[in-house]
Amino acid sequence: MLSLSPSMQAKLDHRATTFCHCWRISRHDAAVMGFTDHDRDLTFNGVTFRANTGLSASQVESSVGFAPGAGDAAGALSDESLTEVDLLNGLYDGASVETWLVDWSEVADRVLLDVATIGEVRRGETAFSAELRSSAHLFDQQQGRAFQRSCSADLGDARCGFDLMTPGFHATGVVVAFAGGVLDVDLSESFDGGFFAGGALTFASGANEGARCTLKSHLQDDLRARVTLWTPPGGAVLAGDAVLVTAGCDKSPTSCRLKFANIVNFRGFPHMPGNDRVIAYPSTLAPAMDGGSFFR
């Protein structure tokens, strides 16, 4: 239940009001933006909420229980801070959105209606639409470790513990050509083909500076690397753009041990029985099924 000040409650009780909506968007890169459906800019909490941006948002619907609520934010790509490149490069994925009801004649009278998280972002030729998820969507995410054969950590994260900036596991380069999701890059050193498959390519300059793309495949010819991206970046990729590529991991214990010498931090269960063990039945020709280890 919302807690309203007496002055705001009195204004809401009037037949004619001076209220508008404001949205405060906080991205993971610490960028903060404000938008309003009022006809002039408003400022509070250190943020200027820009008018005439074409942004509107629906209220997130919620229900009793743990089902995540959902809403929608739609707008035109008309404000200088809302760029197509940033949307496609995922800078708004997981961003926090605060929805405020504000008296535009006296911004001190305001109330926070909802806090949501941006989910899927869809775009058209001149507009975009972003899914707004309530905090309950966190209950749908996996918590804790997963019992699986492959490693559940991401290469380079805190659970993995491997430093991708270790010499021999990353390289800088310059884009030579780009077509159809395939990049030709001149690297600072040569690597075996496939070494960067499953790894990442981060743009260090150009229209996509800061964007990180996952690599589908990697071919190498001396210093020239040809890499295929799972998803192309949002901005134009031009010859001369600087990039950083980091090694890929297939999450197997073999790669963890031989490629990265990091088996001590392997976050999987490679010796767990498979489906063949589940459906197996006792046989004098098979190893004893007494609950002991199959690997000793």
Image: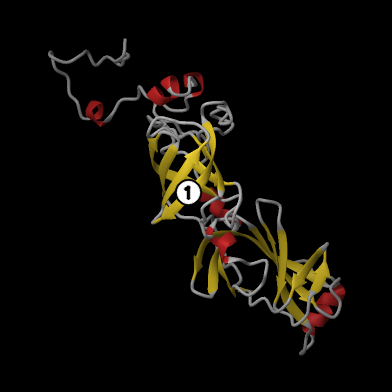
Q: Is residue 282 above or below residue 172?
A: above
Q: Is residue 287 above or below residue 188?
A: above
Q: Is residue 50 above or below residue 284?
A: below
Residue 184 appears at what percent x and percent y? 43, 46
The total number of labels drawn is: 1
Residue 223 appears at what percent x and percent y? 45, 35
The N terminus, quarter of image? bottom right
User: Toward the viewer: 78 or 28?
Assistant: 78
Residue 131 in view: yes
Residue linked to disc 1: 176
Question: In the figure, residue 84 lies in which quadrant?
Answer: bottom right
- The residue at 49%/66% (across/down) is 122
Q: Is residue 136 above or below residue 255?
A: below
Indicate the secondary structure of the residue bearing disc 1. Answer: strand
The C terminus, quarter of image? top left
- The residue at 51%/33% (across/down) is 155
- The residue at 82%/76% (across/down) is 8
**261 horizontally vs 78: left or right:** left
**62 horizontally vs 80: left or right:** left
- The residue at 55%/27% (across/down) is 162
User: Toward the viewer: 53 or 186?
Assistant: 186
**115 horizontally vs 111: left or right:** left
Residue 205 appears at what percent x and percent y? 61, 50
User: Toward the viewer: 90 or 144?
Assistant: 90
Q: Callout 1, which amino acid? A: Val
Residue 269 in view: no
Q: How is the image coloured?
A: secondary structure
